[in-house]
Image (cartoon, rainbow, N blue to C red):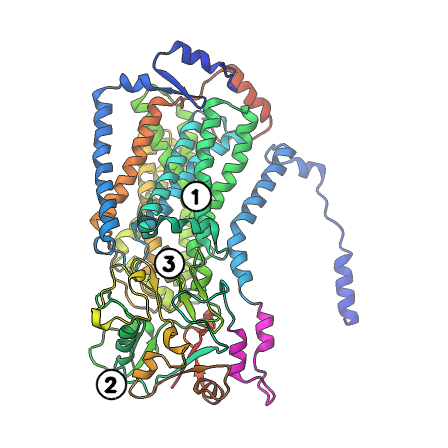
Amino acid sequence: MTDVTSTGVATADIAAVRPGVKRIVGVDFDLGALRSAGPRYWGFVAFLGVFIAMGVIAFLLLTQRWGAVVAMRDTYPWGLWFINYMYFVGLSAGGLAVYASVHLFGAEQFRPLARFAVLQAGVLVMCALMGIASEIPGPMARPERMLQFFTRPNITSPFVYTGSAATIYFFICFFDLWVMITGKGGHKLAFRMTLIALPFAIYLHTTTAFVLALNKARELWHSAVMIPIFLTSATASGIALLIIFAYIVQATTKTRFKPSMFRSLSTLLATVMIIDLFLLVVEIITIYWKTSAMPGHVIRFNAFFFGNYAWAFVPVLVLGFTAFGILARQKTRHIPAVQLTAAGLYVFAVFLKRYSLDAMGFVRTTLGQVSGNYWPSLVEVLLAVGILAFGILFITLAVKVLPLEEPETEEGHDMAHMELPTAPSLEAR
Amino acid sequence: MSSNEERRFGELEQLPEVKLSDEAATCGPSLSRRRFLGGIAGAAAVTAAGVVPALLTATAMAPASEVAAKMPSGTFEAEPAAAHFASIDQPVNYPGKPVWYADPPGDQKFAMVIDVGACIGCRRCVYACIKENNIGRTSGFGYIEVHEMELGTWELETSDIFYQKGGRPDRWYLPVQCMHCAKPSCVYGCPVQATWKEPDGIVVVDYEKCICCKNCLVTCPYGARHVNWIYPEVPVDEINPKVPLKQKYGVVEKCTFCVQRTRNGKTTACVEACPVGARKFGDLNDPKSDVSVLLQTKTVIRLKEELGNEPMIWYVG
């Protein structure tokens, strides 16, 4: 049977002409590419395998000795797994933002990245879900209890919304990728999928922020600005990671992207970055200003400027403004090293920001006692690294075997322009 | 409405409708109308979806007007304080039958009053509670936390919970435990309804439903909930058979107002252990109970009253 993709290319013909290509659910898996992969590729896979194995050992230890091998306690109940949950679902947003801008706003310069962006989003949300599933002891000893999320959900708990959103979003991402690769449903379905995926991405990050913000018991979380901060951090770090991902793809495969695409992404990144930093600064001003400063807030936030979490929070501002400063100069924004440096700084800064945000809720107990430092235990770190390595392995294999490069045919572009005749496009120089 | 007001509102109604000129309407980014409307619809959907949890949480709280209507008016005909608080202390997420380790609730509304002026910080209540409720001896927590503060200060941030010996004349002591709030944020926060408020006001945890997401720990303003990070170790000869033990590993536990005692006509272990009678436990539905009389006759306060959780433990001093 021959399928015709949106670009008019008969995919069955491709399968027919290329040896080693196997079609599964309409997707051509280029398994031959794996066989011809060099020792460096397999060396990297083995390298990831070591971390995955350590993650599995950490998970087994966790199931057996839970409290004895984690650093979390009553005063700090959500540790690295929750930090990573916030971080990963955030990072996945950027991918979706770029992908959606192709379909919704006609940002054609981002089209070559669309499949990579959706893959990145899907894998990151998968890592986030793996983190939850492995860290909450319920699933370990009593997996059936997790079914209560479906059988007796409590509609007043923000957890219900973020958990279900992440699960649905995971399926949306991979279905979306399937639609793009197979071309089933054509541009119409791809456009409709965007209409579903983008609101879900925003919904996911909004509800994740609500898990923190809807807590009157935790002074520093209980702020409405937490929601836009989550959205901007997510978008900025996601775009930054996508820039890094695209450069890695370019360096390790035959896929090439236009410099104008990187420049447009960098401009978008700089814009979101400064909004993100602005929101953080106004929150800090609100906490410290003489007419609004509350002792409970000030004493908690002091730990992030002068106390035991200054190591995590101060770099958020320093790295953030530095990254923005690097990208702000138009004359140098096109330089790959500049783009990569700024993107790398911001991806790291947002991780520290998530770490700090988590700590802001727990730096003191709800009754004001100092909680002490939270440093994740070795088991927690190995588990997190194992999950991350699994995600990277997934992407490494996917980039090799999946047709992620957008086929550039005249027809494809024509169709896009027919769909979006007047849509404004982002800067492309 | 006065004539002046009528005139003012009349003027407002007569304000001309502002219409954009064709030129103004067409300036800006050249988005097609269909796409623009689509974007607006999308944004509205996202906003609506995002605020659903907040709205649902808000609707779970009783309207302010409803609460205000039940507040004592300050006149002699006013509803007694105990009766008022008993009326707002309603079940929350109650599944219709009592938690499996407790007897059926009666028609009481349990509450407590603690006299901080009398409390000497001896922690006998803490130890009695640990023993009564099968709390792991190495678990690192108790249901009651006693804060030592300097006389003349009320600063939880600088209070000491690790003080060596109570009874210092220059200090005062504030015991804190689960407040069995009428508006329990922990119950609202549990994603799987593994914790609820029973008809007699006791907030319970079903250890066989808890998934240990710890969201209740996060939402509780009183730090009253605790996780059994390790298996709760209790000497065999000290195990209370009326209280679960092994089911508590890997889940959240908290004060139950000694449900195994209080539903059988006894008082709580902490009340029984207090050497100075600083703790009073009783039924708000009974106007002659200690708590009802104290609420009616003494100046009382509640911890973090401003949060609106309506805690069912009052302090007097």
Give the secondary structure at mark 3.
loop
Q: Which residues are magenta?
A: B63-89
Q: Which mark is residue B298?
A: none
Q: Chain of mark 3?
A: B
Asked if residue B292 lies left or right of residue A378, the reply is: right
Q: Which mark is residue B167?
A: 2
Whole-percent x, y for residue A371 in the image = 28, 63
Q: Which mark is residue A166?
A: 1
Whole-percent x, y for residue A326 in the image = 34, 38
Q: Which mark is residue B208?
A: 3
- Name above or below for residue A161 compared with residue B228: above
Whole-percent x, y for residue B232 in the image = 25, 63
Whole-percent x, y for residue B289 in the image = 46, 87
| Count of numbered circles on the image | 3
In the picture, residue B145 is in which quadrant? bottom left
Residue B84 falls inside the magenta stretch: yes
What residue lies at 35% left-to-right and 46% top-to-bottom?
A133
Residue type beneath disc 1: Ala
Give the secondary structure at mark 1.
helix
Q: Chain of mark 2?
A: B
Question: Quick one: quadrant of the C terminus of chain A?
Answer: top left
Q: Are marks 3 and 1 in contact (CB under 8 Å)?
A: no
The span from disc 1 to disc 2 (Cα, nearest Å) is: 53 Å
